[in-house]
Amino acid sequence: MTTALNRETYGESLARLASAQKGSSGAPAYSRFVNRRIGRFLAAAAYQLRMTPNQVTMVSALFTFAGIAVIAFVPTSIASAVSVMLLLVIGYALDSADGQLARLRGGGSPAGEWLDHVIDATKIGVLHLAVFASFLREPSGRSGVLWVPLAYSAVASVAFFAIILTDMLRRAQHIRTGVPTRGSRNTSTLYSLAVVPTDYGLMCLSFVLLAWPLGFTIVYVAFFAANTLYLLLALPKWFRELKGLGSLPDREVS
C-alpha cells in the first residue's frame, strides 16, 4: 500500500490495475472482457476517494438489491426495465471493483472475501425469487413456466456454492503441494464465449427485455436451460478433478 492514498493519480491507479488482473479461469465473456474493465475504472475512482473494499461491496449491494426490488414490486414498463438493467449492471461492475480495489490497497482480507461471497449468494437466490414475484404479478402467457424461477434459484444457488467450494479446495491443494491445479489456469477466449449463457453479467443486460414480457420469458427460460445443462455437466467433472487431488491435511470427517 502507498503511504498516502491520494498521492497516486487516477491514471497511475488504472495502470497498476491493468498489470494486476486476476486470472481468467472459467470466466465467461462479459464478466471477463467487459465487467472487469468497467470495474477497473470504478476501483481506481474508489481508490482516489479513499474508499475501502467493504464500502464498495456495500454500494454494489445497494445497486443490486435496488434493481431486484424493482423487478419484484414495480409494474413492468420501459422505464422500469431500463432501470433494472442499469442498476444490476452497475452493481455487478462494483462487485468486480471491490476486489480490484483490494489489490490496489495491498490485498484483501478474509472478512472482506466473506462479505463479498455472502452478498453474492444472497443476490443469486433472491434475484430469481423476484422474477417469480413479477411472473405472479403479470402471469399472462406464463402459466406454464411459473415454476422456472424457483427451479432457477435452486440451480443458481447450487452452482455458486459448488464453484466457490471447488475453487477453495483447489487453492488449498495448491498451497499444500505448490503445484497449480487445472482450474487455476487461464481459459481461452473460445471457452469464455462458449459459457456465456452462464454469465451473470449477460443476464443483467437481459432484464431490459422486461418491457417485452414474451421476449424476456423466452430468454429467461433459455438461460435457465443453459445453466441447468452446464451444472449437470460441470458437477461430475469437478468431482473427478477433486477426487484426483488426493487428501487434504487435517481433514475433518463429518
Image: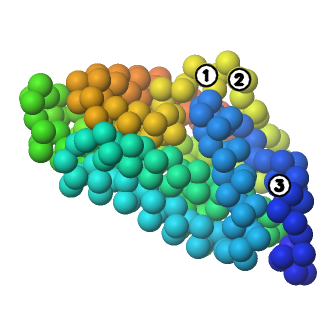
Up/down of 203 relative to 54, above or below: above
Up/down of 189 relative to 208, above or below: above
Q: Residue at x 38, y 27 (%)?
A: 223
Q: CB under 8 Å between callouts 2 and 1? A: yes
Q: Nearer the viewer, residue 166 or 85?
A: 85
Q: Which residue is mark 3?
A: 14
Up/down of 143 relative to 112, above or below: above
Badge 1 amino acid: Leu
Q: Which residue is mark 1?
A: 193
Q: Secondary structure at mark 1?
A: helix
Q: x, y percentage for residue 244?
A: 65, 33
Q: Residue at x 76, y 71 (%)?
A: 48
Q: Residue at x 65, y 69 (%)?
A: 53
Q: Residue at x 59, y 73 (%)?
A: 55
Badge 2 amino acid: Thr
Q: Which residue is mark 2?
A: 189
Badge 3 amino acid: Leu
* Quadrant in the picture for residue 105: bottom right
Q: x, y percentage for residue 90?
A: 53, 52
